[in-house]
Image (tube, coloured by chain):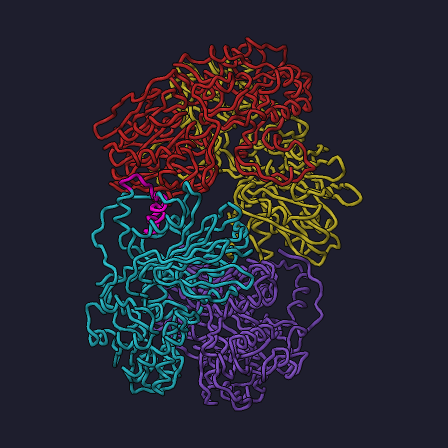
Chain colours: A purple, B cyan, C yellow, D red
Amino acid sequence: MNGCTFTPEELRHDKPREECGVVGIYNHTEAGNLAYLTLYAQQHRGQEGAGIVTLNGSEFHAVKGQGLVPDIFNHARLQELPGNYAIGHNRYSTAGGAGLKNVQPLVAGSALGTIAMAHNGNLTNADLLRTRLIDEGAIFQSTIDSEVILHLIARSRERSFPRRIIDALAQVKGGFSLIFLTENSLVGVRDPHGFRPLSLGRFVDGGYVLASETCAFDLIGARFVRDIRPGEMVEITREGVSTCMPFQLHEGAFCIFEYVYFSRVDSVIGGHSVWMVRKNQGRFLAKESPAEADVVIPVPDSGVATAMGFAEESGIPYEMGLIRNHYVGRTFIEPQSSIRHFGVKIKLNPVREVIEGKRVVVVDDSIVRGTTSRKIVEMVRKAGAAEVHMRIGSPKIISPCFYGIDTPTREELIGSSKNAEEIRAYLSADSLGYLSEEGLLAASPKLGGYCTACFSGRYPVSVAFDQPRQPQLF
Amino acid sequence: MNGCTFTPEELRHDKPREECGVVGIYNHTEAGNLAYLTLYAQQHRGQEGAGIVTLNGSEFHAVKGQGLVPDIFNHARLQELPGNYAIGHNRYSTAGGAGLKNVQPLVAGSALGTIAMAHNGNLTNADLLRTRLIDEGAIFQSTIDSEVILHLIARSRERSFPRRIIDALAQVKGGFSLIFLTENSLVGVRDPHGFRPLSLGRFVDGGYVLASETCAFDLIGARFVRDIRPGEMVEITREGVSTCMPFQLHEGAFCIFEYVYFSRVDSVIGGHSVWMVRKNQGRFLAKESPAEADVVIPVPDSGVATAMGFAEESGIPYEMGLIRNHYVGRTFIEPQSSIRHFGVKIKLNPVREVIEGKRVVVVDDSIVRGTTSRKIVEMVRKAGAAEVHMRIGSPKIISPCFYGIDTPTREELIGSSKNAEEIRAYLSADSLGYLSEEGLLAASPKLGGYCTACFSGRYPVSVAFDQPRQPQLF
Amino acid sequence: MNGCTFTPEELRHDKPREECGVVGIYNHTEAGNLAYLTLYAQQHRGQEGAGIVTLNGSEFHAVKGQGLVPDIFNHARLQELPGNYAIGHNRYSTAGGAGLKNVQPLVAGSALGTIAMAHNGNLTNADLLRTRLIDEGAIFQSTIDSEVILHLIARSRERSFPRRIIDALAQVKGGFSLIFLTENSLVGVRDPHGFRPLSLGRFVDGGYVLASETCAFDLIGARFVRDIRPGEMVEITREGVSTCMPFQLHEGAFCIFEYVYFSRVDSVIGGHSVWMVRKNQGRFLAKESPAEADVVIPVPDSGVATAMGFAEESGIPYEMGLIRNHYVGRTFIEPQSSIRHFGVKIKLNPVREVIEGKRVVVVDDSIVRGTTSRKIVEMVRKAGAAEVHMRIGSPKIISPCFYGIDTPTREELIGSSKNAEEIRAYLSADSLGYLSEEGLLAASPKLGGYCTACFSGRYPVSVAFDQPRQPQLF
Amino acid sequence: MNGCTFTPEELRHDKPREECGVVGIYNHTEAGNLAYLTLYAQQHRGQEGAGIVTLNGSEFHAVKGQGLVPDIFNHARLQELPGNYAIGHNRYSTAGGAGLKNVQPLVAGSALGTIAMAHNGNLTNADLLRTRLIDEGAIFQSTIDSEVILHLIARSRERSFPRRIIDALAQVKGGFSLIFLTENSLVGVRDPHGFRPLSLGRFVDGGYVLASETCAFDLIGARFVRDIRPGEMVEITREGVSTCMPFQLHEGAFCIFEYVYFSRVDSVIGGHSVWMVRKNQGRFLAKESPAEADVVIPVPDSGVATAMGFAEESGIPYEMGLIRNHYVGRTFIEPQSSIRHFGVKIKLNPVREVIEGKRVVVVDDSIVRGTTSRKIVEMVRKAGAAEVHMRIGSPKIISPCFYGIDTPTREELIGSSKNAEEIRAYLSADSLGYLSEEGLLAASPKLGGYCTACFSGRYPVSVAFDQPRQPQLF
């Protein structure tokens, strides 16, 4: 604890981290502003950087930056983004490292004109493709895996952008929800497994929006139309919205963690309120792992919905026993070592009167490394709890994600090497209960199929682990 | 709504605004760092600026800045603050306007040496004193009212700093919780009415801390000792803590809004948990103004405790029907005019499934201008509520504060010109209930007496409304 | 004159503008620092931006920025540039426009490893090559013409970098002095016409330096070895310096403006001191265009050497009648319109005692647009000159440059549409004398041949004026 | 030479350093802009910071900053300075240290209204006055000695600002050229010795300007009216310019270094062109200390005029043998230690062809520490000079200045401990000649008397060397 800095991400204590949010605006006089608002609403999906590209006539304009959305875009910067068409991107770096060069959207010129792209997800064969492209003389401008898609499009011999996009995406594997902007169209595509979400909305006075999460639609006054389907490509042009299913279909593999943790609780996915689904996971948790206790408290804010579901099902009173400092989220300097257990205290402070002398159920959505959960148990116990019962609204995480979520390595996942009793002992909790995979699936909507690789180790798309050495780029 | 900017303050929707937080650290090897952490914990008391002054040997060091605490202090700036003694200040500008020159602590040289000062509160006779001092040739370096105290100390003919402080404070009227740092001592003083809080804490290995709120003690690992009493001055020196009551005593007038809204819910004031007091206010509210409804939802985060108390007392289920975007708090650019009711949406988004078809009780702690409450009622209704019943955990605010809280003018206070029915009509709520002054006092701890001027118009200290013209300063 | 800003470039009044300086350091423990000092010494060759790439082991490091060299590189930035090998670039934008993306050196990964490149000059067939490359799927990261060379190298099928460089450069036309850095070598190349300079130097303790001008060698303590020959490629490796002449040879076409204006007077080109050559041009000017006058004054600093040569040849006393403000060179805000002829006054102020009542010869090196010369004549006359005789150390400029110098369009060149008498009348000078092309060539060293296209309209390399439309890039 | 930074000041090699420039504009619609231009023209008098205060109606506006004038004021900042009245200040810190708080003009409120002040010079009894004022309860906002004047004015019981200014200045000793701005008048004052210059100019369409140097009048299109006399106070009001001589008169003591080095050569002082005076000093130098030599070269730019005078008198040809890099003047990072004699090389580079085999006279205006002169002699010799004869246009500096010039301590002045022969040996010059005090006075205009304390040790105003300890301020 020697004077290092917390990034905002590290302060979201040990959770799997979402990689990205994307947005596209078609035909609205305030396209740049609306893209900005959407990125703001989707800030939880990526705090490392953000960018917007707009199209005005045949001119493209770009503003990108590192940091949080309101720090990147001010009034002057937004005025540099004229035009009725826009795409934007929230970046959390899963692949490629940090740096301004890696902030999307990416833009490329080609014989067909200019194309801009925003990508949410992760490709599993990006390194192989990159090596092949470099051998053929391609020069990469970033280190993010998404750029290979752009090179494949630039090199395609197809005569239109939609056909080139299909041509390119047929060569990549992994998870992608992609938005493209060209002079004539806005294109949205989801990979055939449908790992990551993508929704279509409409403005009252015409115009369309594509975004990762529907909470953004509420903010910008758009009406939700429908989710893009796994493997679907929609093209929005002056003629309206056309659709096709150009890829070989696979079993659905929607990331169930969107319901568990990633998506904002005021979003709707697959027609279901995330808030309600998450509360339902809490109910199932209470049924599977009941506790004799006096009070149920959430780890704010991630465990609030699950805890309320648990409390309602169990009949144990719900209380706020841990208070979050709402200015957390900024880069924060941690002072020197004589102050202990500092990381959690700066975020959470216990309310002694709520906890003291009580048997407490502490509810959170998931455990990754376990370090934060351990500090929370200690904090609750020091505030006078008679017993501390930890309840988790999802199964043990045992495997890393390769489709766009930033999880630690297998070694760092406490669930990969310890069984539940060992984890309980590590946390020093009186009891520990996870929601089972069956319970989680039962508590969640019946969509076309989920990816549960992080709980089960069953990967829907094979992953190449041998990665050739790359020449270094700036 | 033409491209203007929200300050973080404006985003805390229409609430009375706290002016300041103060801190002093005596004899700790990380005094500067601990002052910083305290300012961070007290960030809600003032977001306009912050400053720290430390004492190392006989050298004083200062870092001040505008903006939020983590934006002002980075690792390098904290290293400019050596020494075992520190005072700090969170600034929200009640008097004196913005600008770096007005960020405290203030420092002055005198024949006795150097003295630094941090002030929470507002003086009611500052302008008269200032005019007199300028006539006598004093040159002011800031436009904040607190500076008159420093000039009075500099001009006092007493032979020690404690006696000069008493000499100076005997001449001022109004509210003050003050901390002074000199080469030999750390001094804390509360005005005889005790308008603003000030608490004393102690470190395990010796050393003391004075701070506005106890939530900071939890963060920095200090043990709460006791509150400073109204009219008390404590002096901390190498010999320990000495105390005196140098001022004529008055009836207690602690600002009851500290329990209603200002203080963090994890703080303890007068031995009582703010969380518990605020929940109790909710219970009394439920008794005074019950509602036939299906669900109780808070306006997050200000109404959470009150709403939970209301729900428990009434037996109506508590739910989260409004979700707050936790990245709000930063300066935010508001786009152009075609997007309506933007200000509230960027903070709050409804969860339709929670609200739709329900009779909803919306609970908040207070109403100042009413503009935000009106937008919230509209938002809840648009999300499908069958009925919207507004319940407020404090009485109607009818008068401005002159003791350190930034309230709008009387004209802007919706409670000063409209009766409850008119306000209900303005909000378009199906019903509206305020907690009565009697109810509020009954629900709150029995301390030595409260200032309820904003509800009752009864001002404990007379206020001079005629203010002489001041020469302009930079 | 409505509040616009002068760029530093505009303040170098109407001169043709040099495009670039390049540097490469091979095997010196302070390679990054020495590259920085060289860029500083070559600052006059480009003030828009600068960049350095170093090689440390097999890792490349880069720092680039916009503005002047000392503003871009501070101590911390220089520490980001470890390693014993470096290349650097001073940018003045001739082709491609402004912006950080256009600051060199450029870097590319390829199957052979990483290569970095710095380019001084201008390609005349860049647009055609760019279009072809884009058709083939290349994605450009900048809008500067130099990037096509990098793509040609990346696409070459040759098995070593030197062979790929030759392969690539065989396809381009125009002017180039290029430096490349790879993991194994530092390569310097001049185009077969030798438009732009490039010199080789050596450090006392081994190690080599390539730079545009020898004035940099003096600064960094390197010994001048020799100029790189037109069409020559030198490769510096662990084995030493090897050389080859891989391109078809052409008649020499060294830019004579390097002697007239561009190069610093303390540089040596082709074995000849620029100061001495420029003074000799002044002597020839005095012989060709004598004047009956009392005093010779230069336009500082561009006309100093020429004026001293003129004074020595003519026997008329040399004086400083115009004083330059040496803080000029920074961006400067020009106030509103009521202050006239402001642009020149901020740079130059007359010394009335030197000028008053005298017949004055004003000497400068060249005239481009004529606007500044006109203001200078007026300023000298207002300071009391009896007569003003303008003498110019080079011929009338009638044609723009296509090989790397930023000249205005033909229409803006006062020499392209007006004869000498018309120009004299425009300047309101009592007489005007240019040095003839023959005189200029006679006064300058006998090198292998000069490009005099700007005076004569005879272009050594044909220029494609039809440029296909480019897709837009960021 | 371990990676330290040169300030712009240090790069002006070892010269005495001017402390300040001042300006006042009365009744011009572009007062703020004109003040800015004047500060720009007077940049050589102080590069540490600058500030402007304007008066618009009865409102004062201020912009201050650290660094060079064009870096502090941009278009937006100048628009913050409305009004027809302005005063401004170029700061070089002689007393009080660096920091924004010490940038003038200073402003104070008083019972008479607001007053702003800009000061060029140095007070010799400031510390005594400061101690007395602090004892009386004054709180200082800066550490510059000028602030005591403001406190004396604020405390004066006189009924008008002009009388209070006289009252205050009667108590101070030392050198001052002061400008004050109040709501009703612009006031200019010179101390009774007239140490520092101050001139009055007039605009064509009414309105007045006060400035340190007349070179500024040329830039802003003002006509020179006359110099303010030693001990004179002029007050400019709506009625015009009134004058008085309120102080006891002393013998004139104008700083002769203004003619030797400080003032720009295009300024006029006491009716005499600085350029012409400085050339005349060179002529006298040639008569007193002739040299058998082939060429006379100046140390640019400080020695140019003196060298031209020397060359004309001696008949030895004048040449430019040392070239200055005109981008010097910015903060510059010096790399590590393996590069020797770096400090001078970055500024000056020799032209070998001019120097080689010649007997060279190197002319400069003064020597302070001697370190730079020594490096220059070495540089000229390494460039091949057969002999190096150093000639200096002023006497040996033996004593520090206490009236506003930043000279090193007596120990650091090479002239205080070494005789001329020892200095010659230290410089390794073949001969060394200073201009004698008599010669300097004979070569300079016959004004009312000069201060030659730095050459002679005769101080016109006594200096208090014992300075009481000050309380520390921020």
The magenta segment is B134-156
> Is residue A74 shown to the viewer in this render?
no
Q: Is residue B92 above or below residue B14?
A: above
Left or right for B473, reference D286: left
Residue in the picture at 64% in, 76% down: A414
Residue lying furthest right in this view? C239
Inspect the magenta stretch and tell me whether residue C243 lies in it.
Answer: no
**The N terminus of chain D: image quadrant:** top right
Residue B383, x across and y down, in percent: 34, 80
Residue A430, x across and y down, in percent: 58, 83
> Is residue A146 shown to the viewer in this render?
yes
Inspect the magenta stretch and tell me whether residue B146 lies in it.
Answer: yes
Q: Is residue C185 above or below residue B441?
A: above
**The C terminus of chain D: image quadrant:** top left
In the image shown, does C15 or A65 lie closer to the viewer?
A65
Query: Residue B377 occupies which quadrant of the picture?
Result: bottom left
In the image shown, does D200 or A207 lie closer to the viewer?
D200
Query: Residue A418 occupies which quadrant of the picture?
Result: bottom right
Q: Is residue B286 above or below residue D327?
A: below
In the image shown, does B305 or B179 lie closer to the viewer?
B179
Residue A439, x across and y down, in percent: 55, 89
Residue in the picture at 71% in, 40% down: C232
Count of picture labels:
0
Residue lying furthest bottom in this view? A287
Query: Residue C449 occupies which quadrant of the picture?
Result: top right
